[in-house]
Amino acid sequence: MAWIGLDIGGTKVYGAVVENEKIKAEAKRSTPSEGGPEAIIDALVGVVADLGGAKRVKGIGIGAPGLIDRKKGVLRHAPNLLAWVDETPLGPPLSALLGDVPVALGNDVEVGVLGEHRLGAARGLKNVIGMWLGTGVGGGFVADGDIHRGSHGLAGEIGHTIVHHNGRECGCGGRGHLEAYAGRRSLERRAREEAAQGRQTLLVELAGEERMKSSIFAKALEAGDPLTVEMIDEAIEAVAITVASMNTFLDLDMVVLGGGMGGRLGDFLAPRIAEQARPLMFVAGAEVRIAPSELGDAAGAAGAALMAAAAL
Amino acid sequence: MAWIGLDIGGTKVYGAVVENEKIKAEAKRSTPSEGGPEAIIDALVGVVADLGGAKRVKGIGIGAPGLIDRKKGVLRHAPNLLAWVDETPLGPPLSALLGDVPVALGNDVEVGVLGEHRLGAARGLKNVIGMWLGTGVGGGFVADGDIHRGSHGLAGEIGHTIVHHNGRECGCGGRGHLEAYAGRRSLERRAREEAAQGRQTLLVELAGEERMKSSIFAKALEAGDPLTVEMIDEAIEAVAITVASMNTFLDLDMVVLGGGMGGRLGDFLAPRIAEQARPLMFVAGAEVRIAPSELGDAAGAAGAALMAAAAL
């Protein structure tokens, strides 16, 4: 029994076929930045075709970056998808274009954490936090083996928990949130502000007017660019504080780092976060394992397929 | 089917009979501060006698303040019980003294949260944090209806999550923990330090050399004692930050305030914490209900009886 999972990101749509708890095929296409929801749905259909079509699959799961209505299959709000129009149905039109194959809709970070928990770095573990360091910072909590959705389906927003009360301004308008220290968009904004004030940084030299991608942060970090080192140090500290507090309250097996920044910089970040978090734990030296994502770009798509298998 | 619950506190042992999800009787005795574990076990036997004896009950649950071994019924470490000797068995000798009635051992805060969730302020709710503001600050998380124990049975230590990185020193040696701002012992230590440095405060005038009980904080607060007002304001802010972050990540229905300070000052604290937490939430203005304990001193005993009913 095969299932297809689709992960819609701001820059690419990633797809995977999962059968018997194994990833059998992967494919990706660029996410259209114009052309409306139709263009994005066309890209999904294209990825499904690249994966061999929907005929022999039991169903399709989608991880979408935003606020969703699971029951209606509507993507209600998706600020990182430029071509999207709020409140547009996503599941039903995709299903209609693919011969009425059943489609289930989920949140992109939630399916990513599910993928890592079932098939990746955290497989077999009971209590796991997935921390998705991407454009923003998302999260998911696997509690006793199941994703914790909370009382109103809003759980997981670890990026907007408070690290430094009255600290740096977050993109959401709040202050001192984890995302303000560890989200790619926050770091880019800060780099451009500092550059505008005359500070030299490789980040702006490499990115120019374009989006400051994770790969640019990786390059600038490797070159020892002082602003990059300073910001990444702050990010590591912010994540370590969050990990220490959450582990003290929730008693975890592992924290998995995913997302664009987590994927690109995970091997660098993980041991440094663990080292800084350890002395901040209540049980001094508590073993909290911090691991980079194992599935990388495929985590969300694989998790979306698994979500569909469970929901449909 | 009746069950007895016993809650061992630093100053009193509280007992309750629970039958058909209702509290049928309550009793309390002072907790001996000397005489060794035998004296404490004698006090438990006394409370059981006050409740009509163990003959017609199916079993007894105990909430103990410290580190426990559930399987062996051993209270391994209990720093707040002066007469206790670490690693002494508690369940088996009590059972033997009461005609071999089955006895289950649990953590005092965990059974308190269970009591409030099943019979008190949070009954019928799915996702609840119990915050026990007592000598220290303990906690419990009801996730989708069940107590979340974590991967090593160590979950719930909300008092040692970080509110202000590198902030005030906590009794555990850490810095900036919630307990350092909102635990009775931390507040007492700070009041005595400030008094030693010449600051006048009603807290020390009222307490003298004795323990600075919650009732003394209540009196000093009512009288408008400046140091008390300052410290309680800091405590409210610290709890509000914690509540905001936990609600953002876990999506809760309610936070229940229990414990000595929570019981004595809950009506004063709850609306002020809610007011300060609201603007700190990711979903601005998110409805988080902050409620004082409804069962008060009986919460732990009632919860211990319910724990026994479930475990035995």
Image: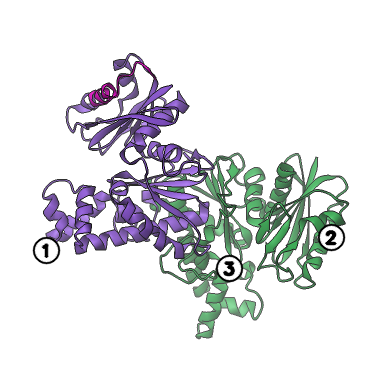
Chain colours: A green, B purple
Q: Where is mark 1, residue-wise?
A: B198
Q: Are marks 1 and 3 on the same chain?
A: no
SS state under label 3: helix
Is residue A166 shown above or below B235? Answer: below
In the rendered structure, the answer to whether residue A82 lies left or right of residue A150 reads right
Alpha-carbon span between mark 3 and mark 2? 29 Å
Residue that label 3 marks? A184
Helix, strand or loop at mark 1: loop
In the image, what residue occupies the spot 40% across and 50% down? B291
Magenta residue span? B42-57
Q: Which mark is residue A46?
A: 2
Callout 3 amino acid? Arg
* Residue B11 x %, y %: 22, 37
Residue B106 at least partly seen: no
Callout 3: 10 Å neighbours few (<14), some, many (20+)? Answer: many
Residue B9's image quarter? top left
Residue type (three-letter) at the residue carrying disc 1: Gly
Q: Amino acid at mark 2?
A: Gly
Of all chains, the one bearing label 2 is A
